[in-house]
Image: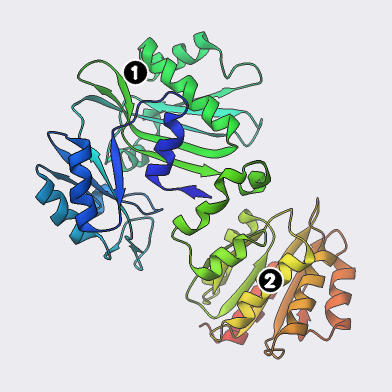
Amino acid sequence: MLLAEYKSKELLAQYGLKVPPGRRATSADAAEAACEKLNAKKYVVKAQIAAGGRGLAGGIKFAATPSSVHDEAARMLGSKLVTEQTGSAGETVNTVYVEAAQDLAAQHFLALTLDPETGGIMLLASSQGGVEFEQRARMDSEIVKTTVLGPGETSDNAKIAAFLASAGIDDASAADQVRGAIQAFTENDMTLLEINPFAKLSDGSWMAIDAKIALDPSAAFRHPEFAELDAEQGLTSVEMEAQKNNINFVKLDGALGVIVNGAGLGLATNDLIIDAGGRPANFMDIRTTATSFDIAKGVELLLRDTRVKAILLNVHGGGMTVCDTVAEGVAFAYNRSDRKEVPCIARLAGVNAEWGNQILKDRKVPVETFGDMQSAVTRAVELTGGA
């Protein structure tokens, strides 16, 4: 679950991080009115979308006067912002955030994520930062320094300060801000916290000029305070329905529906489909907490889409999601759907794979089963005619 920039900053401020004064607005008039409360010498108008790369795409604009804020907000609101991360479809701007512009003396990059090998918190920092930082980092990965904070080290002042100094941020007050960010990351079950730029102001203080937060959806039961944030993520009604049923779902423009458990497997499956000349209708990741009824809801979303000509079921059973649970969900969805003729190509492997295949056949799902991914993908793409 991604938080909008203004929500991210509200959360960080609760942990002592300094953020620019700002107000959100959904109309140009409201954006102009916000300036009276900010009473700044100069303003920044920021499009509130989930994707990054706004600055290079015209989604961040400086304005010297409230009337200029009005004009910039009017230009952004309702428009589609196309960035490197949105793809050609872009993302519609429904909200802008008006901030008091700051006098920056230095810009740095700071981020927190989870280390996949140890499960510890990985801290990333760079002596550089700002709008073009991602491009520079792609050209030279050495500009980003990393360290992993193990148990008991998340409040280790000496280690954090020494790491920041190695990344070009040699300031005790910056380390104080970073400790607050680590606490926010831990207590709110984040999977990503990115501050870019993490800036030193002309008065020597440090501030989170921009912030991006991703929350772990599997930990949502611990955070009822975030329950109402789905509508602010820029999700379609279909994607929101999937989220409520323990399924990560992104609607795409192809004709081949994809049912997969695991984000990595989902990405690999979609890559195979494209390599075979097909086009996926969606990205899907069945969460480990999903029941067969949750999975049925996800499959129903695909069967409801009249552009979907076939469904590819690619599941590796293990852990909490076993093959028969997924097969039960698929069978439920087909039983309740008016489109029972949509062919299903199944490749099941791992725990209860044979049982899962038998369930699909016994419940009269129009299924063809395959033992390997490539064969299954090739047949599924054939059925959709490459669409």
Q: Identify which residue is drawn at 55% across, 46% down.
A: 226
Figure colour scheme: rainbow
Residue 286: image location, x then y, percent: 68, 60
Residue 136: image location, x then y, percent: 30, 38
Q: Is residue 43 visible?
A: yes
Above or below, 149 relative to 30:
above
Which residue was labeled with disc 1?
Answer: 168
Q: Secondary structure at mark 2?
A: helix
Q: Secondary structure at mark 1?
A: loop
Q: Identify which residue is drawn at 18% across, 50% down.
A: 32
> As drawn, is 227 to the left or to the right of 162?
right
For the residue carrying disc 1, how many other residues have a C-alpha within 10 Å: few (<14), some (14-19), or many (20+)? some
> As drawn, is 31 to the left or to the right of 137?
left
Q: Identify which residue is drawn at 21% across, 30% down.
A: 102
Above or below, 184 relative to 228:
above
Choose the circle earlier in sequence order: 2 or 1: 1
Residue 280: image location, x then y, percent: 54, 73
Above or below, 370 relative to 171:
below
Amino acid under label 1?
Gly
Residue 337 picture quarter: bottom right
Which residue was labeled with disc 2?
Answer: 297
Q: Identify which residue is drawn at 47% across, 41% down.
A: 213
Q: Tell me how many marks there are.
A: 2
Amino acid under label 2?
Lys
3D distance between C-alphas at marks 2 and 1: 50 Å
Q: Nearer the viewer, residue 272 or 131?
A: 131
Residue 369: image location, x then y, percent: 78, 77
Marking on residue 372? none
